[in-house]
Amino acid sequence: MKKLSLFLLIAGAAGLLPACKGNNSSAAATDSIKTTVDTTKNVSAAMGANADEEFANKAAIGGMAEVALGKLALTKTSNADIKKFAQMMVDDHGKANDELKQVAQKKNISLPPTVDAEHQAKLDSLGKLSGTSFDSAYVNLMVDGHEKTLTLMQDEASNGKDADLKAFAAKTAPVVKTHLDAINKIHGNMK
């Protein structure tokens, strides 16, 4: 925002410069102002595109994390409900990840190849747990993660600028809601 303000200030000053030199051409100043307004529109469009790209990156990281956490849970838990849920994470998020990659490729959006440091730390931490400690931590992480992911998907479906990413989010949100309902049920049964 500071860069935009600075740019607008410089552009405005550049438009006034001819008037300061005694050039009474109001057309030059008007053209400069029009250019500034047009640039502002372009910045707004770019900001929308950046928000869509940010969504794609967050969705990709979250999806990769869900698959990795699901695979971890399949090896760590003996709880049948958690195993079933973990397999659903691997299957559903794996499919969604593939769909997102296709959309991103079409849009020339480079998605991260691996999870970020935050999600890697969660994976590492969960990997050190076992038994009911693992189950409890995994379920709590899934509840929190799916609440955040549902909000992310719903926001993009409502406010995204890119039609393909909006469609992806709108299609994925109900799946994430199903996951959230399932993990909340498991969470409630564990109490």
Image (cartoon, rainbow, N blue to C red):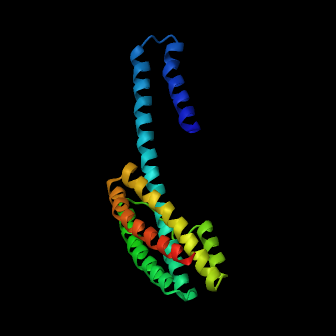
Q: Quadrant of the N terminus?
A: top right
- Where does residue 51 sit, x and y in percent of width and height? 46, 51
At 44% from the left and 19% from the top, the residue drawn is 29
Q: Is residue 61 visible?
A: no
- Where does residue 186 sit, x and y in percent of width and height? 50, 76
Against 58, residue 65 (above or below) is below
Relative horizontal placement of residue 51, taking residue 135 as reference (left or right): left
Against 80, residue 59 (above or below) is above
* Closer to us: 121 or 106: 121
* Closer to us: 10 or 120: 120
At 36% from the left and 69% from the top, the residue drawn is 99
Q: Quadrant of the C terminus?
A: bottom right
Against 70, residue 14 (above or below) is above
* Closer to us: 124 or 112: 124
Number of disc labels: 0
* Closer to us: 161 or 28: 161
Q: Is residue 159 visible?
A: yes
- Where does residue 189 sit, x and y in percent of width and height? 52, 77
- Where does residue 78 sit, x and y in percent of width and height? 55, 89
At 49% from the left and 17% from the top, the residue drawn is 18
Against 19, residue 50 (above or below) is below
At 32% from the left and 59% from the top, the residue drawn is 167
